[in-house]
Amino acid sequence: MSADGREQERLTVAVARARRRFLLNQILREATVAATIALLGPILVLVIGQRRSTVPLLVLFAAAGLGVAGRRWWQRRPTAYQVAQVLDARLHTKDQVSTAVHFLDTSGPAALVQRQAALAVAEGANVEAVFPWSAPRSLYALGSVFLVASTLFAIRYFLEKPPRMEKALPTLLAQAFEDEADRSGRRKEGYIQEARQTGDDVGEAFPLTNQEEQNPNIRLQWPDVSSGGTREGPETKDSKEKGDKDSSRSDAEGGDQASSDPSSFGQDQPIQSYEDMLERDSKNGIAPTQAQHGQDNPKDQSGSSNGAENQNSSFLAKLKDAMSNMLSKLQQKSPGGPNQQASAGQSSQGGDDQQGQGDGKGTPGDAQAGGDQATEGEGAESASNQAGKQSGGNSDKAMKGSGGSKSMSGGAAGSEEGDKKTVEAEQLEAMGMLTDLYGRRAANVNGEFTVEAPAGKQSLRTPQTAKQGRHGDAGGEVNRDEIPLAYQAYVKEYFNKIRQNAKAPQPQEPLPPPAASPQPQQPPQP
Amino acid sequence: MPSPQSLDRFTQEIDLVRREIGKVIVGHQEVVDGVLIALLAGGHVLLEGVPGLGKTTLLRTLGHALQLKYSRIQFTPDLMPADIVGSMVMDTHDGGVKNLRFQRGPIFAHLVLADEINRATPKTQSALLEAMQERTVTSGTVTHELEDPFLVMATQNPLEMEGTYPLPEAQLDRFLMKILVGYPTREELDTIVERTMAAEQPHLEKVVDRDQIMGLRRASREVLVAPHVRDFATHLVMATQPEQSIADPLAKKYIRYGSSPRGAQSLIQSGRVLALMRGRWNVSIEDLQSLALQCLRHRIILNFDAHAEGKTADAVLSEIMARIPVTTLA
């Protein structure tokens, strides 16, 4: 073999060594692609469940992954010349190796000399440093797919332990949600029935309409209606009569927990909504499902079927209960706002009853205070009697006793009838509702309105906005052809001057304050 | 015949010329290399710079060092084509015999300095076209060939543009390179002043003769150009043409007319000489990248948007070049 032939062979071997390393890197990259595609099979099985075609499906995805990766590898398989280019680019060898590889079969004098120089470079190259093992970008895709598969498996494991892979995942999820909806519905019905049985005052104060009787959820969907201020009037009306009755009934129906705890249902505060019931349960440390079974079905409290349901209650149900508890607490604790206005409106509708029957504690202006006092009224007859005396003697005193309420005038029946304060309070409450209504309408209504203003000299002041204009805003466009050759230099110089002027620092003048700027006076509008 | 020894010899010869020019010209190595590349590649060079930067001195020094015939033409508005190429004169011999003889103009030289070429009329400028491209001069019905090597080095003054005739694009395209001559640095200026104060002027030696230059030219044609390097040149040229599908977005935005195919030719020719000067028998992409601005800046015409936004041909070309892949591997 001639010297030239030996040089050719050495150069080929050196480049082939680099190419092998490059191909291994590429195989690693394509293997991650294949694994990504193959993982789609288990994901599909996790979603649709185990069928007869599970194994062929898995095999199909694995084969598809291998096929795609193999095809990609084959198509992207670099030639020795391309590997030499990469080698040159990474070693900064001025394209000597790639040129030598391309002109490997050329026997010209320049090619021979060039090949010798390239051989020295290629043999001295550290292939491991030039083509290091690197994590391919497809590894991120593989990680993402693996994460999806793990998540799906975790969901399945959460829904059925151990995962039997018989049903499709959407079916399992739908069943879980349906079960949860059934449980929630049963809880609500139980609460409502319990409320009707235990708190007949609630039923008297808020007789259910036909529609509500058919669907109790309608009433439960309006937490504003259940504010304390609207109900405490009627509630307190019967507090004398039913204080003992409620406590004894709650003892009978609520079991040991309700009777032993003085703050339990029937003694602490009236049941006004589903949220109230949930809150009461949470205060008593009873889970909603437990409360339901303990009060609705006392016999089944230690039963086996409902106990199993409680164990299987999902995290979603707990989260939902916690959210409703939190919302109901917030609604009750908020001292003002729309709830208050709504309750005020309702209390004004039943104004006669309040005046005649209220004991000075049902303050429509303050729901929280009213609620607290209604509780007192329910808890002890003596407290309500005392309050009645106070309100009969002095209405202002009653207002102070009701937590600083402004609008409600206390007093016994007939003693303060026709009091102006009550009428004003009702009007104020009505105005509050109207304001709320106008506010809601104004959010969506557009139109014109006329403002009556007294005649005289008026001026409309509008804040002035500082805005700068630019030369390019005019939208002028000039093409190069429109400028004669001899004038192009002048045009170029012109723009240079413009740019220089733009770059030069200009003294900054303080802008006049917006209010101080002179504004045109507008004639007074009729 | 290319060989490792011949490569060393070529490199030494070029270094000798550089060193000899360096006795007179301080700094401006890029300008000196550009002129040498144009000479060895068989092209012409356009130098643009303010007066007093040594453009004329460079060519005169080159003529001395290379033992080549040197002529200088000062272009003025009243210069006529015959003043460049020559004219027919009547000779009267003994005995009253008269005949017409072609009196050669200053274009018949190896190195021609066309000083302030933009001050002559287009008619006179076009007299250079045939000489630069065809390397022939036609007078009447007779065509005279110009002797190799033939290098036209034109200078342009970017100042005092009033009363000038900027070179048309067709003529600009005939220059292999357009080299911008900048101001010297502080150290270079100190050296220039020091040499000016010296009592004796530097003595220039003739280091390379015409035959050696022609040998260098032949050797440069042997330099190998790999396909991917060639692809880089063509890709770069086509990327400057806004109507092409592979045109760079910047070219579509700022370039009105892209480079002609002569741009790719000049890139490859210049790259070969540069590779030889750098001691290699193959052209690399780095060679083309270092020559791209000089070879292409006068071949693209920017549109009005580029002028309005202060974009220069160099800036646009640099951005385009940075986006061109250097390997064919996807």
Image (cartoon, coloured by chain):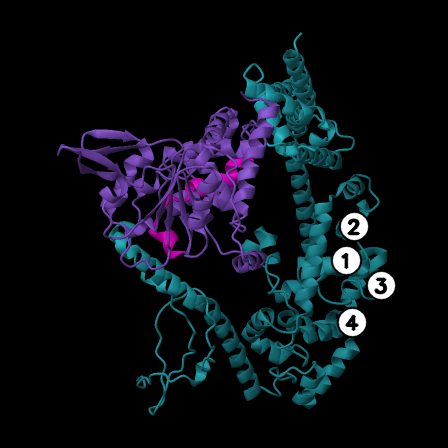
Main SS type for the magenta part?
helix
Secondary element at tag 2: helix
Q: Which mark is residue A359?
A: none
Task: Give the colour in which the image draws chain B.
Answer: purple
Q: Which of the marked residues, 3 or 2, is nearer the chain's N terminus?
A: 3
Q: Which mark is residue A379?
A: 4
Q: Do discs 3 and 2 belong to a common subunit? A: yes
Mark with earlier residue (4, 2): 2
Residues under labels 1 and 4: Cα distance? 19 Å
Image coordinates of residue B232 in percent, x first then y, are 49, 32
Mark nearest the camera among 4 and 3 is: 3
Q: Which mark is residue A281?
A: 1
Q: CA distance from mark 4 to mark 2?
A: 25 Å
Picture disc at residue A290? 2
Relative to A447, residue B20 above or below: above
On what subunit does the disc labeled 2 rest?
A: A
Circle 1 — which element?
A: helix
Residue A261, disc: 3
> Which amino acid, mark 2?
Gln
Q: Position of residue A77 (x, y in %)?
A: 60, 21
Which residue occupies 66% across, 64% down?
A202
Q: Which residues are magenta?
A: B284-309
Q: Earlier in the sequence, mark 1 or mark 3?
A: 3
Of all residues, the one furthest to the front in this rendering is: B95
x 84%, y 58%: residue: A257
Verify CB contact (< 8 Å) between mark 1 and mark 4: no
* Type of amino acid under label 1: Asp
CB under 8 Å between callouts 2 and 1? yes
Q: Look at label 4 and name its amino acid.
A: Gly
Q: In cyan, which chain?
A: A
